[in-house]
Amino acid sequence: DYKSFQFPDTDSGIIGKKIIKLYEQLETSKKQTDLEKERNRKLKQEMTNNIAHELKTPVSSIQGYLEILNENAELESSKRKYFVERAYAQTLRLSALIKDIALITKLEEASTLFPREKVNIGKIAEDVINELQAQLDKAGMTIENKLERDLDISGNHNLVHAIFRNLVENSINYAGNNTTILIECTKEDTHFFHFRFYDTGFGVKEKYLQKIFDRFVRLEESRDRRTGGTGLGLSIVKHAVLFHQGSIMAENRAEGGLMFKFSLRKHPSPATSETKTMQL
């Protein structure tokens, strides 16, 4: 065992000790690299299994509806219309799932492919609200957008849009009807904009808060596929925030509801302008 080898207190002995120390460092580094490779392998395997599981539901549903239509040529028109509409709804869910999988994969493995440009966050948040206004109205929800129109960053338009759209959709799906969403920002920080996004709804059980950004995690029995989500929305939010060199956390409000606090860097730092997003 080289670790038990005793070197004399001479110049050559000192050199020998340094060589052994370097070898130990290399050995430790190799073990850490091997552990990281194994961790990444398990994460990719887990995601592959989760994707296969999530894809199975809409595919099986579409197959079932089409089999009914194919095997019942004399089915009355109203029932045929119902099954066609159900099949179409599942194709929309399947399309959204594939789109989200592609986005999160690109964020994890090729984030440098996302171009940067001048992005106005206030305008994007306003666009998202307009896009989802019908769903907000249906749920009896109101939204207070307190963002000013001078919140410009050097970032990616599509990713900033994904942040706000997924957060609003999350509140629509889980906050409950007749609740309020509020979006606000502080900009005193020289390098970052700091945002608070919260609703006045049900919130999340404390034990689930640490898992809220995980992929395909069903945090509660009420948070199931009936809400129409892909199970990737908040994971995409976190990856998009990390792309902009920010951070994000979730917490329950004492007054009720769930709050997201996150930051976006105004301009990328030179040393990390091409930093890849962290893997979850």
Image (tube, rainbow, N blue to C red):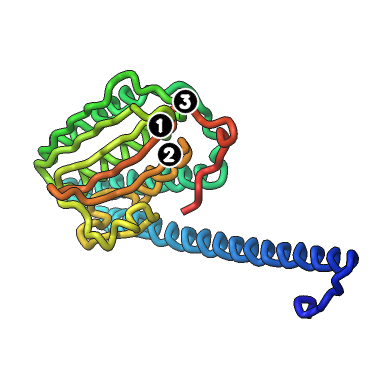
Q: Quadrant of residue 261?
A: top left
Q: Would residue 136 appear left or right of 273 to someone viewing this image?
A: left
Crowdedness near tag 2: few (<14), some (14–19) or many (≥20) residues, C-alpha within 10 Å: some
Residue located at (21% from left, 51% from top): 252
Q: Residue furthest top?
A: 150
Q: Quadrant of the N terminus?
A: bottom right
Residue located at (33% from left, 19% from top): 150
Q: Are marks 2 and 1 in contact (CB under 8 Å)?
A: yes
Q: Quadrant of residue 266?
A: top left
Q: Position of residue 206 (x, y in %)?
A: 24, 60
Q: Which tag, 2 or 1, sits closer to the chain's start? A: 1
Q: Would residue 147 appear left or right of 94 to someone viewing this image?
A: left
Between the C-alphas of marks 3 and 2, the distance is 13 Å
Q: Which residue is mark 1?
A: 192
Q: Position of residue 175 (x, y in %)?
A: 18, 47
Between the C-alphas of marks 2 and 1, the distance is 8 Å
Give 12 or 279, whichever is nearer the viewer: 12
